[in-house]
Every structure is written in structure tokens, then in C-alpha cells.
Amino acid sequence: MLAFARETTSVLNTAIDVTTRKEACTRIVTLAQERKSAYICFATAHMLVEATHISAIDEAYRFAEMVNPDGVPVAWCLKAKGFSNAECISGPRLFVDLLQRAANEGVHVGFYGGREETLGLILSRIRRELPQLTVCYLHSPPFRQLTEEEQREDIREIVESETQLLFVGLGSPKQEMWMRQWAGTMPCVSLGVGAAFEFFSGEKRLPPLWVQRLGLNWLVRLCQEPRRLIRRNLASPVFAYLALKQLLREPLRRQAGDA
């Protein structure tokens, strides 16, 4: 078993992991190979603001194995605190990295959430591009509140499928709270990857890298889905204000080698 030293820093009272995409990918795959019962979150500016006043989201983050900085504004906040090695680790991009690593290292994957059509497109792309990857579970739950019996049946099927890495695409904050509730009952690593299913399936397109590096991903997504995302993007200035307040009252972290 490999030992990983977890380094975190508080952003709006949530412990965010300071890591790189490569390090995060290696750690998650290792946990999956060990069949660790754990879950991974990707914290956007919107969700970090929500966590300040919604206890269920805050609790989901507190018990997560990792909480990755999803979005350039969150990564910029980490860098402003003195963590120069911090990277933006978005669910959609790490999703692709993890599929490749899982294919190379024989890790079995599963998918929970999304529409049946989306899962079908994902499976078709995997068969074309990653034929050696073992997909042992696919399920699109109904878009309604499931009964306790239905939820337990889903968990039973996930366990019996012997999935090691479970991608959960229920959207935030539903997926975070679902993982918090059930992850301890499954011998696998769950990841709340949100819209990654639709990006990988080709139903939605990620903005170009230069747009993401400028922190304008939110603007492109807003233009694509204005009705669904308008409220979420109103959280961006709130995050900037709260993060700036926090940065002004905290001392800058000293880098190794500083005088």
C-alpha cells in the first residue's frame, strides 16, 4: 500500500487538496486498486459558497478522501495563499486521465447517473478508443427521488459488479450528498464528476484550453446553458469577495527555501 501525504488548505472553511492532476490521478487509481471505500469531490467556486450555508454540502466535503480545486478561480486562490504548485483539477479533464490509467492498469470502472443515451455514447467511445478498459457497471437512475429500496438495490448492484472506480454523474450537490450517504457501503472509489459524462459523450463541448486558463470557462458554459447556469454563476462574485476577505486576514504561506 502506497502512503500519500495529503496537503490541504482552507478555502471558505473547506479543506481543499493542494496537488497536481498527475498526483491526483495516481492517488485515486491506487485507492481503487486497494478497493478503498472512499469518495472524491471537485469543488467549484459556486459549491464552495454553497457549502458556507448548506450543512449537507459542508459535511460531504469534510468526509471526502479528496476535495480538488475545480475551476481556475479556486486554483488562483490556492496560488494566492502561497501554494505555487497548485493546479486546477476539473472533473471532466481528470475523468479522461482516469479512464486511460484504468485501462492501462486493469482497474474496473462503472458509471452511475446521466441519461441512458449519454451512457450509451460513453460506452461506444470507450469501445473505440479504450477497448482494453473493463466497464462492469452502467446505470441511469430515474430523474426523481428514489425510494430507500431503490437506492439500496442500486448499491447492491454496484457492489456485485466489482466496480473499483465509480464515476457519479448526478450533478451538484446531489452527487456529493449521494456519495457521502453511500460511499462507505461500497468497496470502491466514487467520484462526483458532474457534466463530465456529457463532455466525454460529445453532447457538450469543453471550452478551449486558453479560455479555461483565463478563468472564463464559466462564461462559455453560461452562454451554452443560460437558464440552468445563471444562478450558479452569480456565486462567482460572492466567492471572489469571500476569498479576498480570507486572503487579507491570513499570512502568506512561506515557500520552501524562502529566507
Image (cartoon, rainbow, N blue to C red):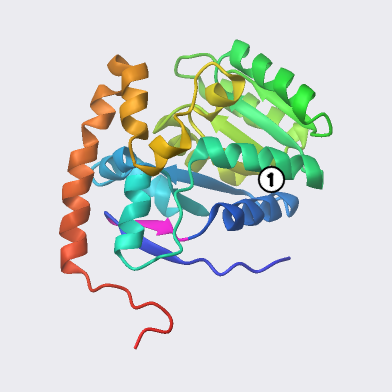
The residue positioned farthest toward the top in the image shown? 117
- Give above or below for 194 relative to 204: below
Percent position of residue 104, x then y: 80, 44
Magenta range:
13-18
Is residue 186 visible in the rendered image? The answer is no
In the picture, measured across the screen, residue 134 lies left or right of residue 53, that is right
**Which residue occupies 34% across, 68% down?**
82
Measured from the top left, where is residue 191 in percent x and y? 56, 40
Residue at the extreme front: 210
Task: Please tell me whether mark 1 sits on a helix, a strand or a loop.
Answer: loop
Residue 50 in the image: above or below residue 227: below
Quadrant position of residue 168:
top right
Pick whichever, 27 or 156, lies toward us: 27
Locate residue 33 relative to residue 58 in the image: left or right.
right
Q: Position of residue 36 (x, y in %)?
A: 67, 52
Q: Quadrant of the N terminus?
A: bottom right
Residue 15 in magenta stretch: yes
The residue carrying mark 1 is 187
Report the side of 163 relative to 38 (left or right): right
